[in-house]
Image: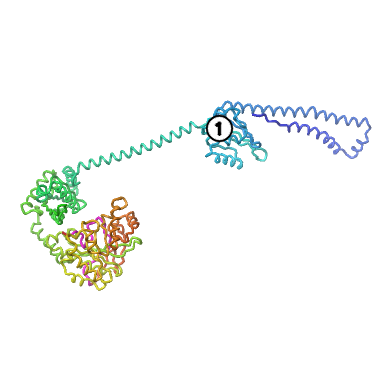
Amino acid sequence: MPKPAFPWIQFRGWVAFLLVTPLTVFAYLIFLSPEAKAQVFQLELTERWLFAGILFVQLLATLFVFRPISRKIEREIDRREEAVAERFKILARATNDAVWDWDLLTNRVWWGEGIQSLFGYSPEEVSPDVAWWEEHLHPDDKERVLSGIRGLIESGEQFWSDEYRYLRADATYAYVFDRGYVMHGPGGKPFRMIGTMLDITHRKRDEETQRKMTTELARSNAQLASVTQELRKANNRLRRLALLDPLTELFNRRGLEQVLSREIHWAIRSESDLSAALIDLDDFKRFNDTLGHAVGDVILKETARRLKTALRATDHVARIGGDEFMVLLPQTRLDEGIRVAEKIRLSISETPITLSSGLVKVTASLGLVEIPHGELSTDALLSQAHSMLYRSKQSGKNRVSYNLKGETSRGQIEAGKGDVLGRLRQGDCFHAVAQPIFRLETEEPVGYELLSRSSIEGFEMPDDFFRVSFEANMLTLVDHQCFKTCFAAAASLPGHLRKHLNLFPSTILNIPIWILLEELPADASRGIYCIEVSEQQILGDPSHLVEPIKALKRSGILIAIDDVGFGSSCLESLILLEPELIKIDKRCVNGLTHSHSRLRSLERLLKLTQGLGAEVVAEGVETAEDLEVLKSLGVPYGQGFFWKNASCQPEEKQGNCFSPHPLLPGRLECRVLPSDSPADSKEPGGAPPP
């Protein structure tokens, strides 16, 4: 470190000498009285020499007293500065850091020996110019570091620190932690900055290694959590598969035992009833022997699907072997279980199963029993149910047998069935509900679809009362009654909105078209009314419907083909009947966002409808994501559970129900039906025709 020199101290001594003596004489003369001053100038020569002698003594005192003291002070200052410099040099040698001393006035830097040991530079390579240090900063750090130092100096602060990369002699970069202290002179002007550079490369590497290890550990933990989750899911699937029949995905015998034990204990605690029905397909062995076991498997899978569709959410169904199924009906009395069993029987037998070789008619016999509250094994339950099932087989198959107790007799049950058919035939048990149809772009209602309901206990839904009607050969009669009920209720809707009514194809063929036209109002010719025909109901040759459909069109009635994309005769029906509207089945719409194959199928279907020039209505819209996909595909209209809170705008309104016109039969409830409800089928009732 260079020794600081202070020439101004020596200069100060001479200035003092030259100034003190004249000032002494001047002061002496000032303080004398006028008389004294006159006497001084009138002194004799001897007296004047005496006065000069006094001044000479003062001069000697200045030379030999003040100057030695000044020199002593100067030597003391130099000694102290040398001591400080020596301590600074010792400190620089004692530390491994690179010590530096920067003269801010000359931009010269003194470097300690650490700059050589830390970064591998020789003494000849180290330059005292501050630009040498700046040149070795990493390009990505240079601007930040220099800006930080400039800002510190300009702000008047004293302490600075930063981390950056510094170039070594071997062309590699070291991470350093640099810190400095700014010294300020008179007036607060900075003139010097000293500091140290510490090599923290190893610490940085350790931190980076630790960061990588932490990241790797987090990734490993995430993978472990994922594997654990997958393992848990796999275990759950294994446990579930252990309780399921692999063909039908219903409970197997083991699953039935667990469910039966749980339901019996619940029935005991809640003092509720519990019933069970044993189901056996009629002549199933004949199907296996004549059509093969592969066809038999198809029949079993379709039967399982129909069973799940017919049952309530609280019911349980299991395949216990071969073509036998067991249904548990919690909180169900025996007389209630009879209606459920009849619904199951009708759901199995109502529609032939479509195979590659043709249609197969399948029926089933059922044995219904009430389960006692005592401990009961699966074998004991099957033994009781088999006796009732045997009775059904002996009585001609395709029926339900049961053993009633108490006041209710078999005759009363049969009389109850007759009462159901009588009320259906009379038609006074029906009312209508309305499901809005929306313009997707604005989500405003453009029309309503009218759907029928029954007030008969146990036969409220279309799936129920249409099956009973078909078995009693009164399907067309009941369908016509539903059509008239929905038409009457449609009068309560605002006149500018389109009204959609449903008819079975068989009803259009069996009832003279002029009768249907006479039942329509005078404003039907304005395109306000639309008759929907479900594509899955058109069995056989659709050309038989061409003339009746044309007659309806000539009268101003719009024609819609419903459930498009689900049935097998879609293309032929669309070409021959030339509908004004095409309604896409909900199974083609639900889950568009998460199913690429379903999205592609819908895109191909929309291209077909564009060629036919028909408007498109998407059914079963349930999520905002599916709605956005439909909008992007250009689908103009839709309906579904997504608008479950939609409000209606009737001419007369009471809560969520339309008040019926005093002269019109029936009543109209306005609500959005869930798409997974059986009521979401779009014929007046909801069940496909037999």
Which region is colored magenta? 663-688
Identified at 65% across, 40% down, the residue is 189
Q: Residue furthest left?
A: 394
Q: Secondary structure at mark 1?
A: strand
The image quarter containing residue 448 is bottom left
Residue 674 belongs to magenta span: yes
The image quarter containing residue 572 is bottom left
Give residue 249's position: percent from left, percent from top. Answer: 20, 46
- Front-lying residue, 103 or 239: 103
Answer whether residue 576 is visible to the viewer in this image: yes
- In the figure, 298 relative to 648: above or below? above
Q: Residue furthest bottom?
A: 522
Report the quarter where the C terminus lies.
Answer: bottom left
Display colour scheme:
rainbow
- Give the left or right position of residue 145, taking residue 562 as reference: right
Residue 157 belongs to magenta span: no
- Give the left or right position of residue 426, taking residue 590 as reference: left
Identified at 34% across, 38% down, the residue is 223
Structural crowding at the residue carrying mark 1, measured as other residues with C-alpha within 10 Å and reported as few (<14), some (14–19) or many (≥20)? many
Give residue 635's position: percent from left, percent from top. Answer: 32, 59
Question: What's the amino acid at mark 1?
Answer: Met
* Pointer 1 residue: 197
- Front-lying residue, 461 or 167: 167
Answer whether residue 340 is visible to the viewer in this image: no
Give residue 234's position: percent from left, percent from top. Answer: 26, 40
- Give the left or right position of residue 56, taking residue 681 as reference: right
Report the quarter where the N terminus lies.
Answer: top right
Give residue 659's position: percent from left, percent from top. Answer: 26, 68
Q: Main secondary structure of the magenta part?
A: loop
- Front-lying residue, 552 or 153: 552
